[in-house]
Image (tube, rainbow, N blue to C red):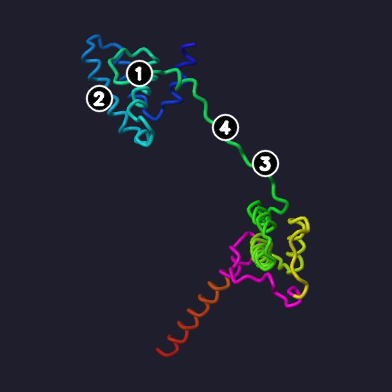
């Protein structure tokens, strides 16, 4: 039982380091109560400097005194300004983090786009609803190009939009006939499937070629 308790203390309060732990063990050997109280207060002040994050916690001083009590394995006998408790820290467990379990139908669009589609389905005004559909379609085209090197047509985007909205979102056929309905002025982020690296390499090669040409021209003038 002792070994288990010590193990938990080290894991929980490792931010104070081994030296502070040794000082706490020394405090347990100080027989003079007045001196023990003074040293405990000095150690709490030091712990506050070593662990400045405690300042952001409500009742920071109370927390530091409890940490001191924890490191003494609940054995420190001092006139603390607060009621000390070690077990609540030793038995505390981190709160469970809920991870999202919803997977998007199309990974390149993501779950946030599906949320936008759900919001657009709630719009009653026909003009606002149509404007929302067009905006979402433009965003879908940008996201599609981010992760796919191939170009995508408005028809494909609209078909994906219909599928994700379960047929509730659509646009008038006359708008589709105009072409480039979902073409956005926003450039797609450079993703793994595009030609960004190739373009950068070509620009460097062209710059190197121009520099060489300039050098050759200067040499010809100097002869």
Q: Is label 1 in a helix, a strand or a loop?
A: loop
Decide whether residue 124 is among the magenta residues. Answer: no
Q: CA distance from mark 1 to mark 4?
A: 29 Å
Mark toward the start of the polypeptide (2 vs 1): 2
Q: Is label 3 in a helix, a strand or a loop?
A: loop
Q: CA distance from mark 4 to mark 2?
A: 36 Å
Residue bearing the label numbered 1:
83
| Callout in the foreground (2, 3) | 3
**Residue 188 location, x and y as percent?**
61, 65
Quarter of the figure with the C terminus: bottom left
Q: CA distance from mark 2 to mark 1?
A: 18 Å
Kindly indicate whether the residue at mark 3 contacts the one at mark 4 (C-beta within 8 angstroms): no
Residue bearing the label numbered 3:
101
Is 19 left or right of 197, judged from the image as shown? Answer: left
Residue bearing the label numbered 2:
42
* Vertical arrangement, residue 13 with respect to residue 98, above or below: above
**Residue farthest toward the front in the current orientation of the protein:** 125
Residue bearing the label numbered 4:
96
Mark toward the start of the polypeptide (2 vs 3): 2
Q: Is label 4 in a helix, a strand or a loop?
A: loop
Looking at the image, which is closer to me, 213 or 138? 138
Is 86 left or right of 183, judged from the image as shown? Answer: left
**Residue 55 location, x and y as percent?**
34, 35
Mark toward the start of the polypeptide (1 vs 3): 1
């Amino acid at each position: 039982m002792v070994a288990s308790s010590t193990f938990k203390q080290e894991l929980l309060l490792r931010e104070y380091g081994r030296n502070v732990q040794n000082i706490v063990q020394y405090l347990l050997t100080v027989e003079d109560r007045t001196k023990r109280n003074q040293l405990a207060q000095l150690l709490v002040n030091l712990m506050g400097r070593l662990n400045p994050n405690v300042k952001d916690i409500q009742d920071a001083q109370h927390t530091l005194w409890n940490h001191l009590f924890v490191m003494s394995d609940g054995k420190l006998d001092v006139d603390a300004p607060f009621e000390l408790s070690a077990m609540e820290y030793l038995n505390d467990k981190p709160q469970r983090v809920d991870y999202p379990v919803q997977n998007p139908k199309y990974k390149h669009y993501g779950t946030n786009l599906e949320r936008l589609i759900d919001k657009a389905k709630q719009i009653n005004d026909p003009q606002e609803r149509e404007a929302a559909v067009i905006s979402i379609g433009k965003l879908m085209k940008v996201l599609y190009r981010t992760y796919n090197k191939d170009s995508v047509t408005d028809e494909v985007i609209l078909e994906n939009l219909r599928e994700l909205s379960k047929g509730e979102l659509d646009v008038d056929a006359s708008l589709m006939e105009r072409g480039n309905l979902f073409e956005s002025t926003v450039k797609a982020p450079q993703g793994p499937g595009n030609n960004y690296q190739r373009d950068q390499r070509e620009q460097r090669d062209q710059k190197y070629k121009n520099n060489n040409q300039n050098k050759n021209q200067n040499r010809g003038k100097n002869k």
